[in-house]
Amino acid sequence: MNEHVSSDSSSAGVARPLAFLFPGQGSQEPGMGKALAEAFPAARRVFAEADDALGEPLSRLCFEGPAEALAQTANTQPAILTCSIAAWTVVTSELGLQPAALLGHSLGEFSALVAAGALAFVDAVKLVRLRGLAMQEAVPAGVGAMAAVIGADPLALEQWCEEASAGGEVVSPANENGGGQIVIAGHAAAVERVVARAKESKARAMKLNVSAPFHCALMRPAAERVAEALATMDIAAPRAPVIANVDAEPYPTSGGPQDVRDRLVRQITGRVRWEASVRTVIRMDISRGLELGHGKVLCNLIKRIDKGFSLAAVGSPADLDVLKLGT
C-alpha cells in the first residue's frame, strides 16, 4: 500500500473519520480483482453478480484479459466498478470499517453511490456498461482527443480553450486532477491547438491514449442515453455523504432520486473537479482514506493535492493484511 492507515483514536476516544475513494478509468489491467476473489467468498459473489447482470463473463476479462478488450470503454467501466465494489465488500465485511464520506473519480462516483446505498450494484453495473457504450459511440473514432496539461495557469488554460474553440470546434478542461495537472478534451484539432499554446508558455502538455474525449460537450449524446436509463432506475438517498464530481459538494442525504440522476448526467459532459472534491473532504475534518479497487491512481493524485492526507490502496489480500495490522 502507498501509506499506512490505522484506526487510531483521538484523545476523546473517537475513531478518526475515514473516506472511501474509488478510481475511474485508467486503473484497469488484466489480473485485477483475481486474488481478492480467490481469497474471499464475498468478493467472488460480487463478480458472479456482475457476470449474471451482463450475461457474459466479465470476471474472466478482469482476471485474464486480454488487455485490448479490457481497455474498451464499454468493458473498462463495469470492470472497474466491479473490482471496486468487491474491495469495498471485503473491507466492510472483514474489518467493519464505515466511511464518513465517499468520493470517486469520474466513473468512480458510481462506485461511491453503490457503496453509499444509493444505487443497487446490479443496476449500476448495467448502467456503466451502457455509459461506456454511449460515450464510445458519441464521437467517431479519431474526431476527439484528450491531453494532460501540467504547470499552466488555470485561467490562462481556460482562455486558450476558448480561443481554440472560436472556429466552432469544442475543447475545454475535463479533469482538474490536482498538483497543477488539468486534462482537456474536445475535437482533436482544437486539443492540438491548446497543446501547442501550452508548450509555447513553457507548460508541459501531452496527448493521452484514450478512446473518446470524455467530460466535454461532445459527450452530450451519451448524457442523453444515460438520462433515459436513469429515469427508470430505483435510486435511494445515500447513507453517507457522497461528493459529486460536477460541483465538489456532497449529495444531500435527504435529497430525492432526481438529484442523483441530474448530477450523474451532468458529470458526463462536465469537468471532474477532483482536487476540489478532495479539499471538500478535508474541510469535513477527514484526513485519511482508502482507495478501494485496483491500482493506486488516486493515491498518487492525492499526494499532489495534500501530502498530509493519509491514503492506502486496498485491492488485494496483501493490501488487506497490511490494513489489518493497523486496526
Image (tube, rainbow, N blue to C red):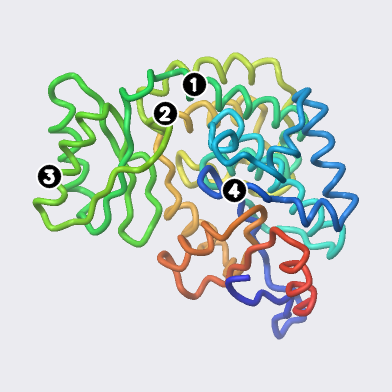
Q: Amino acid at mark 2?
A: Thr
Q: Earlier in the sequence, mark 1 or mark 4?
A: 4
Quadrant holding the C terminus: bottom right
Residue 223, disc:
1
Residue 231 vs 310, above or below: the answer is above
The numbered dot on residue 29 is 4
* Disc 2 target residue: 269
Q: CA distance from mark 1 to mark 2?
A: 7 Å
* Residue 235 placement: quadrant: top right
Closer to the eye: label 3 or 1: 3
- Residue 324 is marked as none
Q: Which residue is mark 3?
A: 197
Q: Are marks 1 and 2 in contact (CB under 8 Å)?
A: yes
Res 97 quadrant in image: bottom right
Q: Residue at x 61, y 50 (%)?
A: 22
- Label 1: how many Cα within 10 Å (few below 14, some 14–19, many 20+): many
